[in-house]
Image (spheres, rainbow, N blue to C red):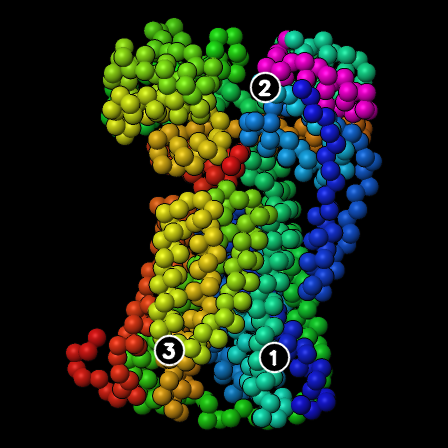
Amino acid sequence: MHRHLVAPFVLLILCFAAWGAAANLTDVLVGVFRSIFDMSNFQSSLVQFAYYGAYFALAIPAAMINKRFGYKAGVLVGLGLAAIGGVLFWPASELLVYEAFLLALFVLAGGLSILETSANPFVIAMGEERSATQRLNLAQAFNPVGANIGVLLGALLILPALTPEPAKTIMSPEELRASQEQDLSLVLGPYLGIAAVLVAIWLLIAFRRMDLPSVPGAEAVPSGSTVGRLWANRHYRYGVLAQFFNVAAQTCTWTFTILYAQDVVGVSAEGAGWYLQASLILFLVSRFVMTWLLGLFRPTLLLLIMALFGVACCAVAIFSLNIVGLLAVVAISASLSLMFPTIYGVALHGLGEDAKYGAAGLVMAILGGALLPMVHAAVMDRVGAAAGFVVPGVCLALVAAYALFDLRTTRDSGAPEPAGTP
Amino acid sequence: MTILHRSPRRLPRRLVALAGAALLGLTLTACGDDAEEVTVGLITKQEENAFWVTMREVAEDTAEEENVELLTATGTSDTDVQSQVAALESMTGAGAVGILIAPTDSTELVPAIERAREAGVIVIAVDTPVEPESAVDALFATDNFRAGELIGRYASAEAAERGFEPRVALLDLAPGIRSGELRREGFLQGFGIAPGGPPPASVDTEGDRDLARAGMERLLAADPGINVVYTVNEPAAFGAIEALEAAGRDLDDVIVVSVDGGCEAIKNGVRPGTIDATAQQYPQNMAREGVEAVARAARGGEAPAEYLDTGVQLITGDPAPGVESRDVAYGVRNCWGD
């Protein structure tokens, strides 16, 4: 790597950590907003809709920014927008309006979406091609570090200090409003902190001269025939669906771990945060274990086994309304740990040049994280807190079905399917 | 036997929080608590009941946040007066500026309370009142009439919705215990049973599961068609349910309501639906508000209010039309015990 790019590279590593922190701090926020605004689970799940919806909506604009203005511009736009989103938490907390927070989250996540889309190729372009993968892996290693910090921030700074619900039962309207202001100020702190870090990185990157290769034009827009070939490939088409349900299962599980601990088992808000932390650590450790196991087993066989394990964990969570159920919820993270990269690899296998466009479809499957948590929350509201885990259970069953499909089907390498094939 | 001890100091949450914030480069100003340390006592009835354990734990947390040294003591049962007298004297001697006490006897403790107050100690009765009420500076407790009224209104609305011709049974506490009387009166008013009319069938249970089961069996022998059961607390509710099941009654055909909101009843009674609704009370509020009120008064602030209603919420998994209630998840989050 060029010496003058070492500092920007370090700053970009911080970006990877920042979006990991922001994403998993959002998982904590669902329960926090439910408590502060005394709302239903469905209403509070709109936090994830705003967050992942923005990620989905801004993915294509991000690619267009990169193509037209370059990676540096993409990173700066992403950093700037995300910082604005963080700062928007301030007027939102003054207004005491939930929708204002959703807007702030949407802007923040939109910025992070652009940042993520730009930062990956930016890191690759920052040095020699032979060490590009190494740089990218190093940078991406800081994403789960940030994710854990995000939950840690929520568990340490927000959850323990929230006004207890019993205390609210005897408050006057004025006292209630004051308690809302105080609780929202707890939310404000970490987001202003994230915004401050993003602004600092923005300044350091904006005013630093970087000579980078331009964005390859060939990566612009896929032709209609490419899309047709991709769509005709069942391994790819079902892979996108499997990724959609994998992201949905992951977002549902992490979003509702804290609520399960509180609503089903009766764990304190302070203690509940640690179960989410344990889930993320288990996810991280399992990733390494799965990487080793993938060397021993066929990936889709391992995917099938772990998806069925996840389904079993969801069933335990639904029917065992105690600490065993909560541990099962935590254990779901072990099953999730191999899914994204495995589905990614299986779906793109053998696509050749089409793979670079196919990857975009798999990334856009993040929409599952925006939509399914709302379904999970609606089930919680209507049937009960534990019953909501039927949603990630079904999602994981569909991932298992994809693995089974891959195991029992020979690849057609994108060849057109006979008419009538589902 | 009285157990008197000082609550251990824990690592301040602010320090832990500060360390976390530093991880992302956040700078938080250290919010040092400048208030002078004061000593406050808490005397509960016993440690076997989760209600009192929760009260102590919340008092300890509040003391930590309020820069208060907390002395705690407890007896061996709900009727252990001597332990509470000894604890009042030792806490007064230890320099407590205020004492929160859950009296095991409404009248026998009054002389000891008066001696403490003469020594300048603020005394707040928590959960249970004393007689006369003026013997303490304040009472922080559940509005038991309101608790009874809530479950009475629920039972009435639910009976109407299910098309029941109500045949009510009351499983009371014991004669002369005011909290039980207030719950019963509240239930009757909430249900719409006029004070002057014929009273429903009732038995005294002392809040005991076995006595409640035996009492319910007698009531069912006299009237097998009972379909609304008021119970003064949750152990009594479980006793009543055992009797109903033993009599072969389908619990879907009986409305059972209760008062307390302990975790065992919320998880094993209200959640599966064998207890249709309960009025949840909050020892957390008694402890938190009590410690804060004493600390505030000792530091020159306003004296504690004479009476503080520490709140009650109706918890049910099957809401009745027109009756405000909270769901089971809320009950689980805020129940006391395991």
Q: Which residues are magenta?
A: B79-107
Pointers 1 and 3 within a single chain: yes
Indicate yes or no whether the magenta region holds residue A344.
no
Residue B278 appears in the rendering: yes
Mark 3 residue type: Arg
Q: Nearer the viewer, residue B78 or A87?
A: B78
Mark 2 residue type: Ser
Q: Quadrant of the C terminus of chain A?
A: bottom left
Could you say which disc has been placed on residue A298 in the image?
Answer: 3
Q: Secondary structure at mark 1?
A: helix
- Label 2 belongs to which residue? B77
Q: Chain of mark 2?
A: B
The percent coordinates of residue B126 (x first, y second) are 63, 22
Q: Residue B46: name its quadrant.
A: top right
Q: Nearer the viewer, residue A28 or B156?
A: A28
Residue furthest to the front in view is A296
- Label 1 belongs to which residue? A138
Q: CA distance from mark 1 to mark 2?
A: 62 Å
Vertical position of residue B113 compared to residue A354: above or below? above
